[in-house]
Amino acid sequence: MSPPGIGASDTILLFLPDRTSPDAAWIAKTEAAYPGVTIRNIPQPDPETGKLRDINDLPESVWEGVTILVSLWPPRTTETTVDDKVVSPKTTLPDLRFVQVPSAGADRWIVHETYKRPHVTISTGNGTHAPQIAEWVIGTWLMARHHFLSFAGYMSTGTGWQHRLEHMGEDSTGTRIGILGYGAIGRQVARLATAFGMEVYAYTRSEKATAAARADPDTYCVPGTGDAEGLLPTKWFHGSSTEAINDFLSQDLDLLVVATPLTAATTKLLSTAQFNVLDKSRTGKRKTYIVNIARGKVIDTDALLHALHNNQIAGAALDVTDPEPLPVDHALWKAPNVFIAPHVSWQSAHMQERLLAVLDTNLERLNAGKPLVNVLNKEFHY
């Protein structure tokens, strides 16, 4: 962790969407809390044109002396090639010591040069998105179970009454949910699922054999949400091998929630073999429904298309896809039993207050020399 203390030697640069960018009151409060600190707040939307700015287009003067960066996007710090032209680094960020990323995932940063610097700590916005994404997960599950889209389609012709017995709704009591990646989002999904009477199976990379291991004290949690002590899962699974993943998928899951970070190890984690496992595990029963709110690349798109067309799964709700954005002529749009959203499950009117709560917590801890929250593990990349 970086040396304690925040003051005159520190410059905080914030480059955020306008929905999460801090206001003047927050800046004044923070400047008062850390005398001498310099705060530069550059909202991503250009106030003159309204267009979204590229972080690499910011003036060089903005980067001078930056020690703390709050941004979803990393700036170019090494020479690279763009459109067959060599592009020099925008900044090398020589004084950087802490990065606060607003997103739950940090896949943009784990391939960045600053990530390799041992003295640079990177924290995510993990936990700030859990309530709204968990609601999106359960909302799409209920939508599928109760055929909301089918009945919405009949509204245009006023023929819903004629079709009312064609779509038998199913409640969730007694069903089983498997959560692939039991982080902040997964824990809030488990909380909601438990309220519906669902049995929760959790999957993590590392073993969680003890009560202490199942607790998660180092992640930001919106008060009144989640499963901080890890008490909700009926059964825990773990491992990084294909065999371990397949064993989890073979557990007769009604709903599979994909909530794992995107890393080299999780890219195409669910492919042809895994859909075959899901198919066989539900022989003679309704197939598994999949909800992906992680990253599109965690699922092999071609394998997913095959699974949808061949009834290997009941269907899928996708807030993320590979590629993203999904081209208008992509085959996934017309696949059966699929619902696709444009990566919006994270959206909430509470995002600004939650992100600033995480940032405030980490600034306070950085100043006091205490361990930060949501610190990115540089060995496992999440």
Image (cartoon, rainbow, N blue to C red):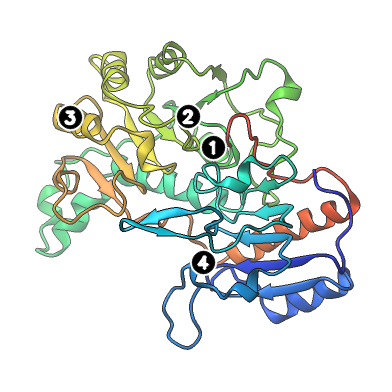
In this figure, which residue is indicated by the disc labeled 4?
A: 55
Give whichever of discs 3 and 4 has the lower sequence position. Answer: 4
Residue shown at 16% from the left, 40% from the top: 336
Give whichever of discs 1 and 2 has the lower sequence position. Answer: 2
Marks 1 and 4 in Cβ contact (< 8 Å):
no
Real-space CA distance between mark 3 and mark 4, rounded to the nearest whole angstrom: 39 Å
Amino acid type at circle 4 is Ile
Marks 1 and 2 in Cβ contact (< 8 Å):
yes
Residues packed near mark 1 inside 10 Å, few (<14), some (14 to 19) or many (20 plus) = many
Real-space CA distance between mark 2 and mark 3, rounded to the nearest whole angstrom: 21 Å
Real-space CA distance between mark 3 and mark 1, rounded to the nearest whole angstrom: 27 Å
Amino acid type at circle 3 is His
201 and 128: which is toward the camera: 128
Q: How many numbered callouts? A: 4
Residue shown at 19% from the left, 34% from the top: 305
Q: Secondary structure at mark 4?
A: helix
- Mark on residue 186? 1
98 and 343: which is toward the camera: 98
In this figure, which residue is indicated by the disc labeled 3?
A: 306
From what the image shows, is residue 173 above or below residue 357? above
Q: Secondary structure at mark 3?
A: helix
Mark toward the viewer: 4 or 2 = 4
Find residue 109 and report its horizontal and vertical position in percent.
55, 47
